[in-house]
Image: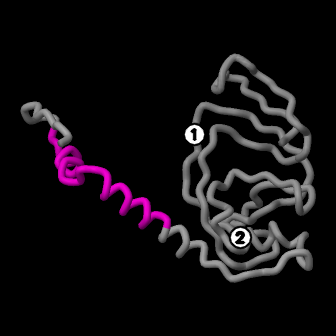
């Protein structure tokens, strides 16, 4: 979405520079060190805490636009040019109601807001998946495999 992506060390392959779509005033430079961390933030204009995680190889230089979020330490994060074009390093951002409200704000008056407990919905889906797995997998065998000690004599596991 940015102006260009640079990969001077060939982290992602043999293409060292690629032009971007130039939708955002940013330039990203890949590096070998991977950033992985839990992130607490708030959406600009909203004081409610939000949570997500970052996982990326590189740094992004912002040369214009406005920040999308403010990290817990006060650092601006992400970039937006308007309410319809934005970018962020934060994964899981769509799990946060304040961000959904921000995202849908341009459509106020065109949509009817309904109450929806996303966390409860997600938990219900995980429970359905767990029940399905329990129904179709030999759970005793799975637990034995998980407790397997590779320093002991090899044991052969056969599904019945």
Image quarter of the C terminus: top left
Task: Please say if 94 is above or below 101.
Answer: above
Residue 37's spot in the image, x, y percent? 55, 53
Q: Residue at x 74, y 69 (%)?
A: 100
Q: Is residue 154 magenta?
A: no
Report which quarter residue 118 is drawn in: bottom right
The reply, left or right, for residue 128 in relation to residue 59 is left
The reply, left or right, for residue 1 in relation to residue 141 is right
- Neighbour tally class for label 1: few under 14, some 14-19, many 20 plus, Cα within 10 Å: few
Q: Nearer the viewer, residue 30 or 86?
A: 86
Colouring scheme applied when the structure was drawn: one colour
- Neighbour tally class for label 2: few under 14, some 14-19, many 20 plus, Cα within 10 Å: many
Q: Which residues are magenta?
A: 125-149
Residue 38's spot in the image, x, y percent? 55, 58
Task: Please say if 68 is above or below 59.
Answer: below
Image quarter of the N terminus: top right
- Residue occupied by mark 1: 34
The reply, left or right, for residue 106 in relation to residue 124 is right
Q: Residue at x 59, y 47 (%)?
A: 55
Q: Residue at x 13, y 33 (%)?
A: 156
Q: Residue furthest top?
A: 14
Report which quarter residue 117 is drawn in: bottom right
- Image marks 1 and 2: residues in contact by CB distance under 8 Å: no
Asked which secondary structure carries label 1, the reply is loop
- Residue occupied by mark 2: 42
Asked which secondary structure carries label 2, the reply is strand
Q: Earlier in the sequence, mark 1 or mark 2?
A: 1
Dominant SS of magenta comes to: helix
């Amino acid at each position: 979405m940015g102006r260009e992506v640079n990969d001077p060390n060939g982290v992602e392959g043999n293409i060292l520079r690629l032009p971007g779509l130039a939708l955002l005033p940013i330039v990203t430079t890949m590096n070998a060190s991977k950033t992985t961390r839990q992130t607490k933030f708030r959406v600009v204009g909203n004081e409610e805490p939000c949570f997500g995680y970052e996982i990326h190889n590189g740094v992004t230089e912002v040369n214009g636009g406005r920040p999308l979020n403010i990290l817990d330490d006060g650092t601006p994060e992400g970039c937006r040019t308007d309410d319809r074009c934005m970018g962020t390093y934060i994964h899981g951002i769509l799990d946060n109601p304040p961000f959904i409200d921000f995202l849908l704000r341009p459509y106020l008056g065109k949509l009817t807001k309904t109450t929806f407990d996303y966390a409860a919905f997600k938990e219900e889906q995980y429970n359905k998946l767990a029940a399905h797995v329990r129904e179709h997998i030999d759970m005793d065998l799975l637990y034995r495999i998980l407790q397997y000690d590779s320093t002991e004599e090899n044991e052969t596991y056969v599904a019945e």
